[in-house]
Image (spheres, grey):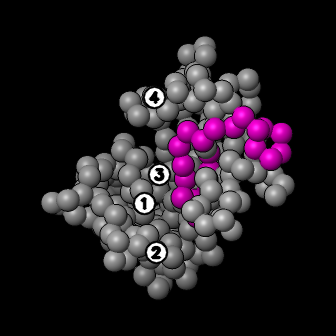
Amino acid sequence: MPLSNIEIIHQDEALLVVNKPTLLLSVPGRAEDNRDCLVTRLQDNGYPEARIVHRLDWETSGLIVLARDADSHRELSRQFHDRETEKAYTALCWGEPAADSGRIELPLRYDPPTKPRHVVDHELGRHALTFWRVLERCGHYSRVELTPITGRSHQLRVHMLSIGHPLLGDRLYAHDEALAAAGRLCLHASLLVLGHPQSGERLRFESPAPF
């Protein structure tokens, strides 16, 4: 498959930063017909050495970094593991939160009976922490900035659902009104800050949300 709408934000000998479109896997799925994904498109179109460092959900768009050699992959992976990176997402959520900002600290786990959904579980869940801030109040929905401190699967989507403000267009977690309010999941990785794996220089990348 061609790169098509994959925008390359930055590239050098150590890394690539790209803008992943919605409805594209970050890595190949288990089924053979799910091979099409961000990393294989890059590998097939001039970047055969590209290695995934972190992931975005299939429906989530935005900034993602890939390494171009083993040492850079190791260093970037370490930064994510040790929470030395900074990430922020722009989202549209249903309703208007009562406060202008807050934190959500609720443990999460995968829920096999309703796969691929995740749920809050105070006994078996893994620690998860999200900070949120209202950017704009728009009546039946709000534009918010979401900052995940941990990186659990579906963390932002489940955490916002847990405080009564599911994300618009979320086919897994939104109620009917919130689902119908947008034609896609309104979640976009809009900020990524990391250290260059070779020079150590602090790099900051921003991508405005397409909604």
x then y, percent, for residue 47: 78, 38
Q: Sequence order check: which comes first, mark 1 or mark 2?
A: 1
Q: Sequence order check: which comes first, mark 4 or mark 2?
A: 4
x then y, percent, for residue 7: 76, 47
**Mark number, residue 145:** 3
Q: Sequence order check: which comes first, mark 4 or mark 1?
A: 4
**Mark number, residue 172:** 2
x then y, percent, for residue 87: 49, 41
**Mark number, residue 47:** none
Q: Image point 29% across, 59% down: which residue? A: 108
Q: Which residue is mark 1?
A: 154
Tell me which amino acid carries mark 4.
Arg
**What is the crowding at mark 3: few (fewer than 14 residues within 10 Å), some, or many (at least 20)?**
many
**What is the crowding at mark 1: few (fewer than 14 residues within 10 Å), some, or many (at least 20)?**
some
The image quarter in which residue 150 lies: top left
Tell me which amino acid carries mark 3.
Glu
x then y, percent, for residue 136: 50, 59
Tell me whether the residue at label 1 lies in contact with that at label 2, contact meaning CB atoms closer than 8 angstroms: yes
Q: Sequence order check: which comes first, mark 2 or mark 3?
A: 3
* Alpha carbons under labels 4 and 1: distance apart: 21 Å
